Image (cartoon, grey):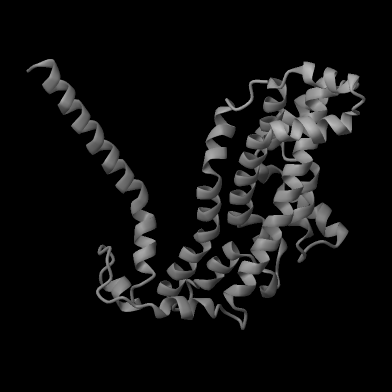
Amino acid sequence: MSYRTKKIIGKILFHVLVTLSCILMIYPLLYMVFGSFKTQQDIFQNPTSLFPKEWYFRNYINGWKGFGGTTFATFFKNSIIITVIAVIGQVTSSAIIAYGFGRCRFKGRSVWFSVMIVMMLMPAQVLIIPQYIMFNSFGWVNTWLPLVVPGFFGYPFFIFLIYQFIRRIPVELDESAYIDGCSKYSIFGRIILPLIKPALITAMIFATYWKWDDFFGPMIYLTDIDKYTISVALKMFTDPSAQSDWGAAYAMSVLSLVPVIIIFFSFQKYLVEGISTTGIKG
């Protein structure tokens, strides 16, 4: 077998494996999308079939009605409000803290940075009980405050991500700004923030995904139906002890993915740039 033939066979095998991997990964999503157009009977009688026997669009109408007298419009509104406030708080506070670690010299800086790294490595589940006790003493249970306020005190992963970007910015820029009469606040707002735009957008994308998909926090702290988020509503929409409308559940699951898909395709170029950290070279 010639070298050219081996090369062609290698390329064919590579593309076949990549295609099979893509189908394997995307199949659950396709099953959910096509399942949202199946009738209840079709879902259970043909569970292995991807395509519906007949297209049933009423699942979206039935699903949007929600449960307990609360429609999915309320759940979407709650998720959007919580996500927007929490993301603004996480990204803004993380950028300020990262600038402090990266450019300011203060006593105990290395100790506090080590504490931040430890917090980044610590599982979030470890903090659930003490946080619940603290928020309960504040009277914050069954409010949105436990879901948005902690974000305004920085998020370790985002602090570390933005800190790595700030480290790549030449210190000479700060020194030139000092000579021109800028303060630390001016340098942060006029010089550092524009240069770390890819890191900020990357943090914004991750924060949006994690807060939008967050199920554990809203499930613990919220008890009133009219305060539920999308993730909790989808769980409550399917009752294992009763007959659930799975077609409607699929339909609402599909709609819940629309905002995050739009955000991903709108900012994916910044996401790649932010992760690769190649956008800042001084």
Q: Which residue is rendered at x = 64% and y = 25% of the image? A: 280
User: Can residue 130 be seen from the camera position used here?
Assistant: no
Seen from this angle, which residue lies furthest front?
A: 180
Q: In this view, does 16 lie to the left or right of 244?
A: left
Q: Position of residue 184 (x, y in %)?
A: 88, 29
Q: Is residue 198 left or right of residue 89?
A: left
Q: Is residue 282 positioned above or below 259 on the image?
A: above
Q: Quadrant of residue 232?
A: bottom right
Q: Which residue is rendered at x = 63% and y = 55% of the image? A: 216
Residues 30 and 262: in front is 262
Q: How many labels does the image show?
A: 0
Q: Is residue 26 positioned above or below 273 on the image?
A: below
Q: Is residue 139 positioned above or below 278 on the image?
A: below
Q: Position of residue 191 (x, y in %)?
A: 77, 30
Residues 77 and 169: in front is 169
Q: In this view, does 31 lie to the left or right of 232?
A: left
Q: Which residue is rendered at x = 65% and y = 62% of the image? A: 80
Q: Position of residue 53 (x, y in %)?
A: 24, 74
The N terminus - image quarter: top left
The C terminus - image quarter: top right
Q: Which residue is rendered at x = 90% and y = 19% of the image? A: 179
Q: Quadrant of residue 161?
A: top right
